[in-house]
Structures are given as structure tokens and as C-alpha cells.
Image (cartoon, rainbow, N blue to C red):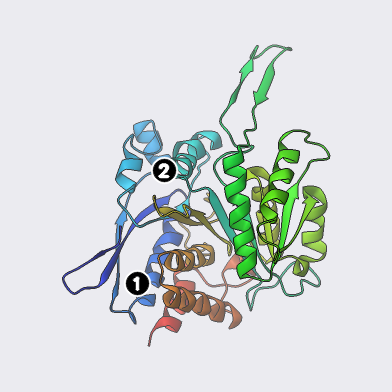
Amino acid sequence: MQRRNCYDSVVARIAVIGGDGIGPEVVEAGIRVLEVAVRPEPSLELEFERFPWGCEYYLEQGRMMPKDALETLSGFDALYLGAVGWPSVPDHVSLWGLLLPIRRGFDQYVNLRPVRLLRGVQSPLAEPGKLDLVVVRENTEGEYSDAGGRLHRGTPHEIAVQETVFTRRGVERIVRYAYEEAKKRRGLLTGATKSNGISITMPFFDEIFREVGEEFPEVEASLMHADALAARLVLAPEAFDVVVGSNLLGDILSEITAAACGAIGIAPSANLNPTGEHPSLFEPIHGSAPDIAGKGVANPSGAIWAASLMLEHLGHEAAAARVLVALEETLAEGVKTRDLGGEAGTEEFTDEVVRRLLP
């Protein structure tokens, strides 16, 4: 937890897991930005400790992280992750071996994905309007529950069963968080459902959505089938403010909104334990991009924005705002990486963000 040093400054301890592919490159860019962003605040000090966990660690040790990893990480104020995944390790092994155990072990039940069309970034939409919304995704249960199995493997009668688990506690708390978020913003909330086709869990979600809504009369709330919602997010994204969905639906919809903002390399993600009982985790939403790993051309924007979210979560809103302003000014002045049609490399782009943070 945050402590004070002998100079009476707050010291926030950050665990850094670079992970795989471009992950280490973009988190190191984010750390450079963070170190400069907090300089105007002598009362704040960041302390980073790096952990070499990921697919390379798996190939050497047979596991993505040590058995006592959660115990080690529990003493930190926040976790900063680059990316997970590499072609030589099956995706379900890498994800279930690192990121999902952290999300569930630390009860990071809110996956918060802010979506905004930053100045200088071209949306693929002809008329994106004022695209500024937040996707709130349930992060610990739902469709990504590790329950089920396969029978009669390798035969014509093979069966695969994956259980979806929705709990009242799980749905209530994510929906309530989304209502609170909408209350702080424009007061509009849309619940993603599929109750016309999924006959048990989705009507359950809808019922709780309406029940919790009775506590928030000031929020204009509605439910929309996820397929229709996906279409509307493309056709009229400016009509939405906060969108809440289950683990799977929230995952898919947040990728759609990120793409509408120009590139998934820009988008951040916060895995939050709102109670503060456990550390929260911050990451860009992009993957490990093995094809460009080590070439110095990765877009660090998502990691930098995630660093801003981390500062905000730790209670340092001014420093968080400075990071996001510097990022947007860099993009607005035409400094862009290749995925955005520019020529800047990772280091050059980061240099420009840092320059805008210097006094």
C-alpha cells in the first residue's frame, strides 16, 4: 500500500509485468512518461519493480508465473501489464495462466474501458460525431467461467460443454458500478443483453439491471440486444454514454468502440478492485503483436493512457490529466506510429509525449 518516505512523500509501489511481444516495449514507454508526469508533485513518488513473467517464463518454467505470484503482487499499490500471448504457447494457457488468475484472485470485477476519439486520430467512421463513452465489463464470472469439459474426445460423438455462471452478487455490483459511472457523466446507461436468445442468464441480468436502476432515478437507463447495440455503436456512437455488459458481451463491445476510435493500439483498460482491498491492474487492450515485437515500431498510446488511468485510480488526478493531455497533443500535432499512418517509432513517439510534460 502507498507509504510515506523520510521526506514525507507518498510512495506508490507499482508491479510491472511487461509480458510478451511488444508488451515490455510499451510499458517501458509508459514508465518513462509516468516518471516525468509526477515531477511537479514532490509529494508523490513512484517505485517500480519488474517481474519477468509471461510466455518465455512458461517455456522455461512450465507456468506463466510462480505459484506465489498473487502473494507477491498483493503488497503493491497497482499492477502495470504490457501484453500476454505468444505463438508457441496456446492462448488459453497464456491467458488462464497469468491475467485471469490476477483478475479473479484480486477480485478485479470491473473492467473499465474509456473510449474517446482523440484529436489527431482519424476514425474509420465517416461521421463519428462526439465519440466519448465508457464500457463497463463484468470481469470475473459470466461466459468466461472455467466450468465445463469435453467428453468422447476424438470421436464423432465428441461433446464440449462450457458453463456460463452469473451470480446475483456479481451482476448487482457491476451494474451498480455502471449506474454510478453514468451518474457522474451524462446520466445515460445502456445495458447489453441477449435475452431474446439466451433464455436464463440474460433475463436474470435484465431483472437485476432494472432492480438496481430503481436506486438511480436520475439515470436514463435502457437495455438493448447486443447485436443491435453493436450496430448502433458504429452508426451513432455519440448517442451512448456508459455501456455495461457481461464478461463476453463487454469484451466484444469494447473492441468495437476502440476500433471506431481509430486503432486498438490507443485504447486502455483498467481492471479494478473498487474496494481497495486488492491492487488493481492497468493495461493497453492490444495484444502482444509478435509480428512487430522488437522492431521499435509499436504504438505505446494504449499503455500511456492506461498509465494515466492508474494515476487517477491512485488519487493523483492532476498528474493523470497531464499525461492524457500530452498524449493527445502529440497525436494532434501529427506525431504518429505506423498503425495510425505515421512514421514515428515507439521511442520517438514517447520522446514527444515526454517533451510535452517537461516544464
Q: Secondary structure at mark 1?
A: helix
**Type of the residue with mark 1:** Glu
Instruction: Examine the image and state in which quarter residue 43 appears.
Output: bottom left
**Residue 101 placement (x, y as % from top left):** 45, 39
**Residue 68 placement (x, y as % from top left):** 31, 37
For label 2, the residue is 54
Q: Secondary structure at mark 2?
A: loop
**Type of the residue with mark 2:** Gly
| Horizontal relation, residue 207 to residue 342: left or right | right
Instruction: Examine the image and state in which quarter residue 268 appears.
Output: bottom right
Residue under the image location 65 percent in, 45 percent down: 246
| Horizontal relation, residue 4 to residue 138: left or right | left
- Regarding residue 212, the answer to whether it shows in the image is yes
- Regarding residue 286, the answer to whether it shows in the image is no
Front-lying residue, 284 or 189: 189
For label 1, the residue is 35
**Residue 4 placement (x, y as % from top left):** 23, 67
| Horizontal relation, residue 209 to residue 350: left or right | right
* Residue 306 versus residue 138 in the image, above or below: below
**Residue 110 placement (x, y as % from top left):** 54, 52
Sort mark 1 into few (<14), some (14-19) or many (20+) by Cα contacts within 10 Å. few
The quarter of the rendered structure image containing the N terminus is bottom left
> Of the residues under marks 1 and 2, which one precedes in the sequence?
1
| Horizontal relation, residue 207 to residue 278: left or right | right
* Residue 80 versus residue 124 in the image, above or below: above
Front-lying residue, 224 or 177: 177
Residue under the image location 73 percent in, 12 percent down: 157
- Between the residue at mark 1 and the residue at mark 2, the CA separation in whole angstroms equals 25 Å
Front-lying residue, 123 or 228: 228
Q: Nearer the viewer, mark 1 or mark 2?
A: 1
